[in-house]
Amino acid sequence: MGPLEVTEDPNFLLTRMRSGDREAAAEFLDRFGSRIRRRVRGKLGPGMRRLFDSQEILSTLGRRLDQFVRSGRLRAESAPELWSLVFTIAENALVEKSRVLRALEAREGEDSPLAHRMLSRLRDVETRSEDGPEIELDRALSVLEPGIDREILSLWLTGHQHNHIAESLGLAPTAVRKRWQKIRERLRELFEPGEGA
């Protein structure tokens, strides 16, 4: 579609996205990104703005919207449904990021040094790349075996204690603690100062 055919109504791109056109999703974000960023900016409190900005959330949104389009899971049939999906994805990304950062800040006890190293790394990479924190968290998950260990880390990152993790996964607390010791060692190696920076 030429530039003269573009309107403020995203329906001209929705049909293409529903058929799996990833370029249409990129065009949607390019065309409507400032509107999305304004909405996200309004949801970021002062503490959140210090850690990441609306452009970072827009990048996360772009990746997730692309996944919906690429996999053929985009179910929106109208502009209002598309906007609802887009803002839901953005708000979920905000919640996830804030939950991880708060959980790392609040960690005490033997996990505190690891949590503080991870938090320091996430803040450092965020200053160099909008997608840095998400990429670092993906790296942390990728050094673990798929399945239970990744689920344990995901739950730990969002602030869950070992007993709750065990209950959620249907495992004995001692089994989770043993697995966590191995996970923690892998993460210490990954997040040692100077590693991966």
Image (tube, rainbow, N blue to C red):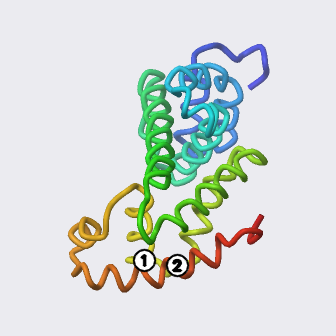
Residue at x 64% of width, y 30% of height = 28
Q: Position of residue 151 (x, y in %)?
A: 39, 69
Q: Is residue 1 left or right of residue 111?
A: right
Q: Quadrant of the N terminus?
A: top right
Q: Is residue 53 above or below residue 179?
A: above
User: Which residue shows up at 57% across the image and 38% down it?
Assistant: 17
Q: Position of residue 146 (x, y in %)?
A: 47, 77
Identify the residue at the far front of this view. 109
Q: Secondary structure at mark 1?
A: helix
Q: Nearer the viewer, residue 193 or 139?
A: 193
**On the rendered image, what quadrant is the C terminus found in?**
bottom right
Q: Nearer the viewer, residue 40 or 105?
A: 105
State whether residue 92 is above or below residue 133. Answer: above
Q: Amino acid at mark 1?
A: Asp
**Residue in the foreground of this view, choosing between 153 and 159:** 159
Tag shown at residue 36: none
Amino acid type at mark 2: Leu
Point out which mark residue 149 bears.
1
Q: Residues within 10 Å of mark 1 (few under 14, many from 20)?
A: some
Q: How many marks do you count on the picture?
A: 2
Q: Position of residue 71 (x, y in %)?
A: 52, 54
Mark with earlier residue (1, 2): 2
Q: Which residue is mark 2?
A: 144
Q: Nearer the viewer, residue 35 or 23?
A: 35
SS under mark 2: loop
Query: How far across and down, in percent of the image, does residue 47 sit?
Result: 54, 32
- Is residue 60 found left or right of 108 in the rendered image? right
| Circle 2 Cα neighbour tier, 10 Å, few/some/many (<14 / 14–19 / ≥20) | some
Q: Are marks 1 and 2 in contact (CB under 8 Å)?
A: yes
The quarter of the picture where residue 188 lies is bottom right
Q: Residue at the location (55% across, 47% down)?
A: 64
